[in-house]
Image (tube, grey):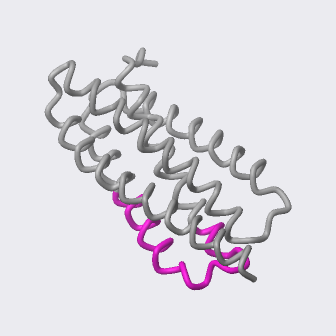
Amino acid sequence: MAELTPLDEKLGEVLGLAQAAQEATTKVAGMEGADEFRSRLERMSQDAAETERRTDELVDSLDGRKTAIREKAADTKSEAKEMMRTYLAEEEEALDGFEFLTMAEAGELGHWEIVKTMGDTVGDDAVARLADWAVEVQRKHVEAVRATCLELAAAEVAA
């Protein structure tokens, strides 16, 4: 198997996180009190699917490293899903789900910013362009889940 560069490893991680994000948004959409935020969650899931598609397309262009990067993605997805299961164990309310998404989306943003820096540093324009796009998507997700958490928190104490 090919040895991965640090950038290859990060590409595997962001690919796995995008895959896990689709499952996380579906999980949160099914939680109590999430109905009014379903369209927001569906948009985030669609964005995660597009991130997965674009990242996988880039990975497909990396001769000799595709399989190893995709294996890294599978490992990352598995780890992220385990974190979700642990955090949301026995939780049923949307606020808990959005609290988890706050951490998950911030983590994705951080990973993409690292990919951007690495791509810029090694002069990989394709990686840098993808990361520019993904960083903007993730910033919107972080703000969306933050705003939703605050809205749900206010509603919880007002009830």
**Residue for point 76% across, 57% down:** 88
Q: Which residues are magenta?
A: 26-50
Q: Is residue 93 above or below residue 64?
A: below
- Main SS, magenta region, reads helix
Residue 127 appears at what percent x and percent y? 23, 35
Q: Is residue 98 left or right of residue 21?
A: right
- Find out whether residue 33 is within the magenta segment: yes
**Residue for point 64% across, 72% down:** 154
Residue 113 appears at what percent x and percent y? 34, 35
Residue 78 appears at what percent x and percent y? 64, 42
- Find out whether residue 32 is within the magenta segment: yes
Q: Is residue 5 above or below residue 13?
A: above
Along the viewing direction, whichever of 72 and 125 lies nearer the viewer: 125
Residue 14 appears at what percent x and percent y? 43, 40
Along the viewing direction, whichever of 96 and 127 lies nearer the viewer: 96
Along the viewing direction, whichever of 71 and 10 lies nearer the viewer: 10
Q: Is residue 80 above or below residue 152?
A: above
Location of the C terminus by quadrant is bottom right
Q: Is residue 133 left or right of residue 22?
A: left
Q: Is residue 154 left or right of residue 136?
A: right
**Residue for point 39% across, 19% down:** 6
Q: Is residue 91 left or right of residue 80?
A: right
Splitting the image into 4 quarters, where does residue 117 fall? top left
Splitting the image into 4 quarters, where does residue 11 fall? top left
Q: Is residue 27 above or below residue 81?
A: below
